[in-house]
């Protein structure tokens, strides 16, 4: 892992520790602690790769985009590229860690997973995994990257890639925690819309902009958004804009005017009014409260 940038959100890109490792690294929490050093895990990180960990011992709270996950033995956490996450007491936990570039998951597998996850899922508690193939899929991946990993070749890379794809599909089959019914496959147009939001939310804030690019009516996008999430298409766009604003306000030092410009607003005043409508807080209030650990408290 290599740090880049100067933001309070530490940008971390994937750099294999040795040529033999390839683009899928299976390590341990101890291994990445030893490699990164004591200061690597103290501040929020935005990864340029996916990180999946399986807790075997200990306990800690891990935060992914303002959601706290209380990790206990047997739990699995998947932090996706681009998400902002914060390690808890990483020195108190042990278990395997898998790091991989999203490109290492073949397109068909990515599309299947995406079609069954309306919203990316980050956390699977041990109780939901006990009777699933996930622990065995994890074991297979760990064995495939075991003592002979220095003998890397195309076959070993293929074994790791197939093992990783199998693990991710098995996690998706488990579905969300709490016994919720499995989600039926989403319409591909909804997937395209979601992808376009991720790509263009910095500049496009209206449904019509996405409708024009995709070649579907705003009514169709609204129907698919409500069918899959219960939210309107505009609410999904606003949700993504606000998430990025919260990331910058909570973890960065940019001014409100700079954040407004980055997110495509004409001026800081328009951005502040927009943010307050969405969150019932001014940007300054959110920044202050998020840094003392209470970002969702109502504004006074």
Image: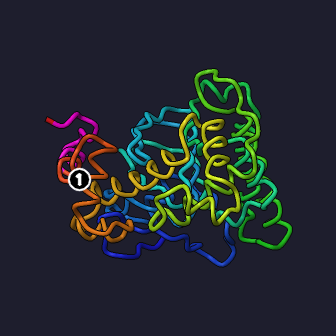
Q: Quadrant of the C terminus?
A: top left
Confirm whether the magenta stretch covers residue 45.
no
Q: Which span is picked out in magenta?
A: 288-299
Q: Secondary structure at mark 1?
A: helix
Q: Residue at x 65, y 40 (%)?
A: 223
Q: Is residue 286 left or right of residue 191?
A: left
From the top left corner, tell me how far across and down residue 287 is, in percent: 22, 52
From the top left corner, tell me how far across and down residue 50 is, in percent: 58, 58
Residue sticking out furthest to the bottom: 19
Q: Is residue 289 left or right of residue 91?
A: left
Q: Is residue 237 left or right of residue 160?
A: left
Q: Residue at x 33, y 53 (%)?
A: 246
Q: Is residue 92 above or below residue 214?
A: above
Q: What coloring was used for the rendering?
A: rainbow
Residue sticking out furthest to the left: 300
Q: Residue at x 42, y 65 (%)?
A: 36
From the top left corner, tell me how far across and down residue 3 is, in percent: 41, 72
Confirm whether the magenta stretch covers residue 293.
yes
Q: Which residue is mark 1?
A: 283
Residue sticking out furthest to the top: 179
- Please name whichever residue, 97 or 267, is drawn nearer the observer in this view of the structure: 267
């Amino acid at each position: 892992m290599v740090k880049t940038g100067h933001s309070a959100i530490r940008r971390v890109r994937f750099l294999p520790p040795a040529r033999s490792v390839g683009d899928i690294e299976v390590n341990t929490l101890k291994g990445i602690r030893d490699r990164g050093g004591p200061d690597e895990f103290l501040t929020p990180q935005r990864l340029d790769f996916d990180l999946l960990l399986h807790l075997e011992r200990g306990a800690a709270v891990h935060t992914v985009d303002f959601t706290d996950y209380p990790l206990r033995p047997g739990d699995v956490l998947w932090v996706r590229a681009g998400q902002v996450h914060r390690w808890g007491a990483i020195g108190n936990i042990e278990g395997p860690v898998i790091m991989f570039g999203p490109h290492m998951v073949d397109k068909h597998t990515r599309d299947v997973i995406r079609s069954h996850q309306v919203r990316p899922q980050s956390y699977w508690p041990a109780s939901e995994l006990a009777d699933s193939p996930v622990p065995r899929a994890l074991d297979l991946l760990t064995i495939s990257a075991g003592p002979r990993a220095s003998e890397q070749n195309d076959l070993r890379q293929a074994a790791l890639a197939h093992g990783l794809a199998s693990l991710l599909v098995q996690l998706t089959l488990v579905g969300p925690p709490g016994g919720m019914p499995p989600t039926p496959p989403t319409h591909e147009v909804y997937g395209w819309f979601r992808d376009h939001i991720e790509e263009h939310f910095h500049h496009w804030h209206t449904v019509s902009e996405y409708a024009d690019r995709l070649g579907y009516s705003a009514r169709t996008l609204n129907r698919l958004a409500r069918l899959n999430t219960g939210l309107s298409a505009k609410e999904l766009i606003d949700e993504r804009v606000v998430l990025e604003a919260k990331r910058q306000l909570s973890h960065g030092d940019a001014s409100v005017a700079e954040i407004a410009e980055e997110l495509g607003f004409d001026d800081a005043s328009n951005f502040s009014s927009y943010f307050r409508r969405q969150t019932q807080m001014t940007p300054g209030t959110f920044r202050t409260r998020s840094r003392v650990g209470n970002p969702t408290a109502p504004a006074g």
